Image: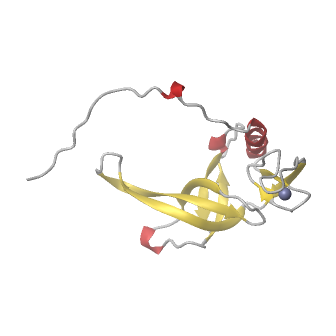
Amino acid sequence: MTEETRIIESTWDLTAYQFKIEADALNLFVKGLKDKKILGRKCRVCGTVYVPGPTYCRKCLVDIDQVVEVSQEGRLDAFTVSLADVRGKPVENPFISCTVKLDGTDSFLMGVLEGWTDWRSVKEGMRVKVVFKDVTQGALADLSHFQLI
Ligand SMILES: [Zn+2]
């Protein structure tokens, strides 16, 4: 006997939830993306480099005002391979979501990984680079994906 997936059409009111986003960090990040740069902030006390860069250090609890441009290359920190859609139906073209630690930074960015042919060959620690969209608009989507080097 096979189990059937039951689909219920409905809505989910997300307005009941509140998410706190530090606008300055996001604004600086997307400003950099428009110019095809990755901008973050560096703490003058402990040297931690955040991308996106918050306005205060999470470790020292001091204000951070030093904006830094960081490398567009880094290493693959973690990833997950999507072999099926949200309903469990296998997808024709699997894709990889990943976190990347850019060189010289102490935080991680999330994105999609491209440049692989067999997902089984993708390994943590592989070198990657940022790929921007050809035309940037100052939006998160300007960072198209990460590419294996
Ligand atoms: Zn600090």
Q: How many marks do you count on the picture?
A: 0
Specify the color scheme. Answer: secondary structure
Percent from the top left, x then y, of residue 41? 83, 52
Compared to residue 138, the image places residue 115 above or below, namely below
* Residue nearer the viewer, 136 or 23: 23
Horizontal and vertical percent position of residue 125: 60, 73
- Taking the view exactly as shown, the residue that stands out farthest to the left is 1
The quarter of the rendered structure image containing the C terminus is: bottom right
- In-front residue for pair 133/11: 11
Q: Is residue 37 left or right of residue 67?
A: left
What residue sits 59% from the left and 31% below the top? Answer: 18
Q: Residue at x 53, y 60 (%)?
A: 114
Q: Residue at x 42, y 28 (%)?
A: 12
Q: Quadrant of ligand 1?
A: bottom right
Left or right relative to 113: residue 136: right
Task: Specify whether residue 76 is in view.
Answer: yes
The one nearer the camera, 61 or 133, is 61
Q: Is residue 118 visible?
A: no
Whole-percent x, y for residue 74 in the image = 69, 66
Q: What is the quadrant of residue 76 in the picture?
A: bottom right
Percent coordinates x, y for residue 44 in the rendering:
91, 57
Above or below residue 110? Residue 140 is above
